[in-house]
Amino acid sequence: MIGIMESCDQVIVESLRCHAQGVEVRGPGRWSFVVGGDCRRPAEAWLEADWLRFRAPLGGGEPRQIDARTLQRMLEANAVLEGGVKFALAGQPDQAVLGAEICPADDPADLDVRIERVCVGIGQGLAVFADTSGALPPLDRAPASADIDLPALCREAEWPFVERGEGQVAVALEVPDVYLSATFRSCGQDRLCVETPLEGRPHEAGCGRAAVGVLLLAACGAVRMARATARTSDNQVQYAWQALTAPVAWELRYALAAISVACRVSAREVNAFVDPRIAGKYLAVRGWCSLLTSDADS
């Protein structure tokens, strides 16, 4: 049986050729291309379990060449990159990459639009990585549009929720022994941002925040669709997981499942890294010894 994405093979090729450069077919369901403006990098796209996945390796991405401030910057950028694009760590040892996933669609008619947004997002991420002190793209924190019936959408997606007035809802995630909920806000004209803050004690600048950065970025590389974010206020950092989705039940189902999985592998660990001894051991095991004495994020 041909998967949904496999049936769109020609659409994917034509879209990549429209929104990227140097597109080459590398095998069944696999393509290479070049994306980005002044910071061009080679990237690849491939089909995996009916998902269309993207990855752009970042040169100089080895652990010894990334400091704690850059890890934090990656998480901050994850909140604003187009197309669900995310900074992540992948491979053995950890390598910095930009990645994205387009989930299987009941109707792939908007596949070209999604691929375009991913290419734009990778370009934005390349610019951030090249200039870690530059301005980030603007963050849209508007509440979900009143035109979207969130209670009805959640019912159709078969996820439990609590109404919070004015059409807003909170959805309980599937995380054993921990109550975490997701809320919604608008992300462009036809996208929702599903977001879940990670509750916990504040982490002091140093190896604790560095360990959280490594953990969350590694989870970004392992969990499809979800991306970890960070927002700093008064020297305190709020970590969260988010996923971008169209306001349709089948895709919302994927988004909530992805954030649930991401929280299962990170929510307790983020709290554990308040202890610098635990954080230090984690960094050493993952090969990030250069961050054990780093104060780059202070």
Image (tube, grey):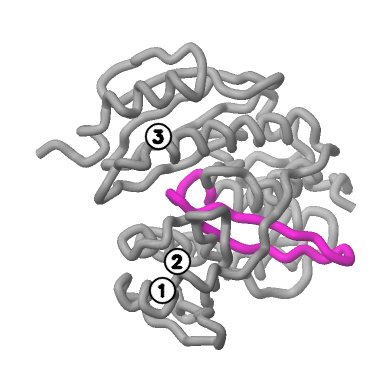
Q: Quadrant of residue 206?
A: bottom right
Q: CA distance from mark 3 to mark 1?
A: 32 Å
Describe the element under mark 2 as helix, strand or loop. Answer: helix
Give how far across and how far down residue 76 sits, in percent: 72, 51
Q: Is residue 263 magenta?
A: no
Marks 3 & 2, CB-CB < 8 Å contact: no
Q: Which residue is mark 2?
A: 260
Name the kind of residue labelled 2 in the image: Ser
Q: Which residues are magenta?
A: 219-243
Q: Which residue is mark 3?
A: 112
Q: Residue at x 74, y 51 (%)?
A: 210
Observer-nearest residue: 50 or 66?
Answer: 50
User: Is residue 156 depicted above or below 100 in this figure?
Assistant: below
Which circle's residue, 3 or 1, is located before the other in the chain? 3
Q: Is residue 222 magenta?
A: yes
Which circle's residue, 3 or 2, is located before the other in the chain? 3
Describe the element under mark 3 as helix, strand or loop. Answer: helix
Q: Which residue is mark 1?
A: 174
Quadrant including the N terminus: top left
Name the kind of residue labelled 1 in the image: Glu
Q: CA distance from mark 1 to mark 2?
A: 5 Å
